Image (tube, helix red, strand yellow):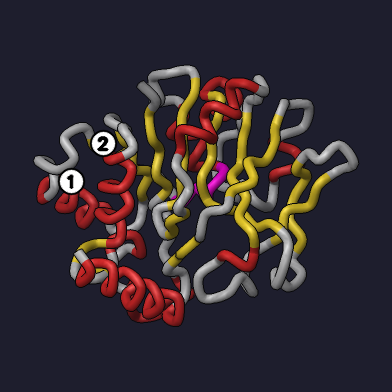
Amino acid sequence: MVDLVVLCGGRGSRLGSLTENTPKPLLPVAGRPFLLHLLLKMREQGFGRILLAAHYLPDLFRSFLSEYSVLLPDLQLILEHQPLGTGGALAFVARQVRGRTFVAMNGDSWVSQAAAPVLEEHQRLERKLTFVAVKAQRVEGGAIQKGVWRLDREGRPVGFSTESAAEGWVNGGLYVFDREIVASWPEGAYSLEENLLSLIQGVPAGLYYSDGRLLDIGTPELYEWANRAWGQTAHAH
């Protein structure tokens, strides 16, 4: 039994008026909150206990938990006392995780990569931190705003290049982490991506190279893209 942590704390400022009254993960996509799509897909993979890390408009997340409690019975809301960023939020929520290992994902993106093979590789290679990487060409709507992974000579991840991501490997937004390592990260607000090198210093870390596709809703254009893509899927079913 592995806990799932979903990062839902951001305001989604790049979406402008769309997120003035709705947190980005709760925006409707194909008629349902984007977050609901994500969580139901993860439930299909066998996840039970799910921790949502949120800060912006918390009452809407409380309503979400109440409305979908039958579909998602073991869903818990972990409220950040201030916006903590991806790194700070992970450190904060890791202290609530029950098992030695947990899976984390971004609440505003979906990568079509099953978690089980990532967990298996993470354990087999005795890593403490595993990051899913996706080919830039397999990012829905283009990867121009995604950072490309930078690797050292041994192939270990050391950070991101901010150059154009027309090719290379980008962050898939799905992670397998050792709870004790992440819980030992500093408290406070900071970005995982911007502080990656210091956070993984001396820790067995690596990338899982996925053939999955990545879709996110971080800009109005990508949000429209997700509605079209998942709307077609919903009609197909």
The magenta span reads: 83-87
* Badge 2 density bin: few <14, some 14–19, many ≥20, Cα 10 Å: some
Gap in angstroms between the C-alphas marked 1 and 2: 8 Å
What residue lies at 61% left-to-right and 35% top-to-bottom?
130
- Asked if residue 172 shows in the view, the reply is yes
What residue lies at 28% left-to-right and 40% top-to-bottom?
44
The quadrant where residue 225 appears: bottom left
Q: Where is residue 120 in the image (x, y as percent from the top left)?
A: 54, 26
Nearest the eye: 4 or 134 = 134
Which mark is first along the chain, 2 or 1? 1
What residue lies at 28% left-to-right and 68% top-to-bottom?
233
Which residue is disc 2 drawn over? Answer: 76
Mark 1 in CB contact with mark 2 (< 8 angstroms): yes
Secondary element under disc 2, as helix, strand or loop, is strand
Nearest the eye: 78 or 223 = 223
Of the residues shown, which amino acid type is indicated by label 1? Answer: Leu
The quadrant where residue 96 appears: top left
